[in-house]
Amino acid sequence: MDYTVIDPKNTVIDADARIGKNTIIEPFCVVGKNCRIGENCIIGSFSYLVSSTVGDFSEIRASRLTDSEVGCRTTVGPDAHLRQNSVVGDGCRVGNFVELKNSVLGDGSKASHLAYIGDAVVGKNCNVGCGAVFVNFDGVSKHRTVVGDNVFIGSNCNLIAPLTLADGTYVACSTTVTKDTMPDDFVIGRSDASVKHGRASRLVAALKEQKTKIDK
């Protein structure tokens, strides 16, 4: 055996799984049927993989992969979820609490935390910000989002499918995108904050007074 299982008693590896040399399997992992793990990988504790492929020099940390593919030199997790034929390219980052469903994340692209990418194709060298949601379901049907290369999607954005973002599009944080873009477009769809100077203490006092009346 050319790979290392730190704690065989607390690790499940299916007889059908194939694991490359110099890979490390940490305790409390499940490597299920039809899994192919490359060389020099780390499969971190509490990871669960079924019918999935992991490329060389990649790292999976406390994450769940089903029917999915991860490229080389890519990091996934902790607490990420890849499912339903998702494909993550080489040199990517899929961070904590990121879910991919039936989606492609191109080489060099990153979704570092708290994002949902569903029914989408994301190009190369893209950034998907914290809290971004690919809104794929209208209550009846699922719809697809296509994102080109070198696209920046800021934090807390909603992409309403069906939608296409062309190469080089920049989506400002807190923007809801409903229309297709052209290359090099800048998209912003938020209103400026209204600041009421010296009103915070008055607001808190009013809220406390209201609560007192309700509690009586």
Image (spheres, rainbow, N blue to C red):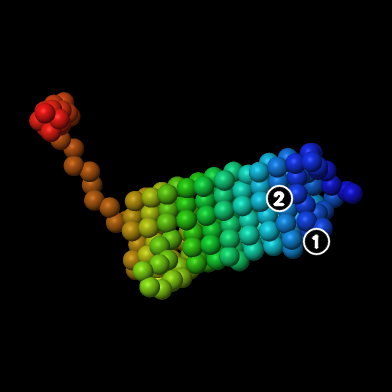
The answer to whether 121 is drawn above or below residue 56 in the figure is: below
Q: Quadrant of the C terminus?
A: top left
- Residue 146 visible in the picture: yes
Check disc 2 and give the amino acid type.
Val
Mark 1 or 2, nearer chain start: 1
Residue at the image position 37 percent from the left and 65 percent from the top:
160
**For the image shown, how many numbered marks are present on the structure?**
2
Q: Are marks 1 and 2 in contact (CB under 8 Å)?
A: no
- x, y percentage for residue 51? 69, 62
Residue 205 lies left or right of residue 109; in this view the side is left
Q: Secondary structure at mark 1?
A: loop
Which quadrant of the view contains residue 108? bottom right
In the drawing, what numbered circle is on residue 182?
none
Residue nearer the viewer, 204 or 95: 204
Q: Position of residue 214 (x, y in %)?
A: 13, 33
Disc 2 marks which residue? 30
Query: Can I make out residue 110 in this image?
Result: no
Q: Amino acid at mark 1?
A: Asp
State the residue at coordinates (84%, 47%).
3
**As drawn, 182 above or below 193:** below
Q: Which residue is drawn at the image coordinates 74% and 63% (left, top)?
A: 34
The local secondary structure at tag 2 comes to: strand
> Residue 44 location, x and y as percent?
69, 43
Residue farthest along the right direction in this orientation: 1
Q: Which residue is mark 1?
A: 16
Residue 96 position in % (x across, y down): 54, 45
Q: Residues within 10 Å of mark 2 (few under 14, many from 20)?
A: many
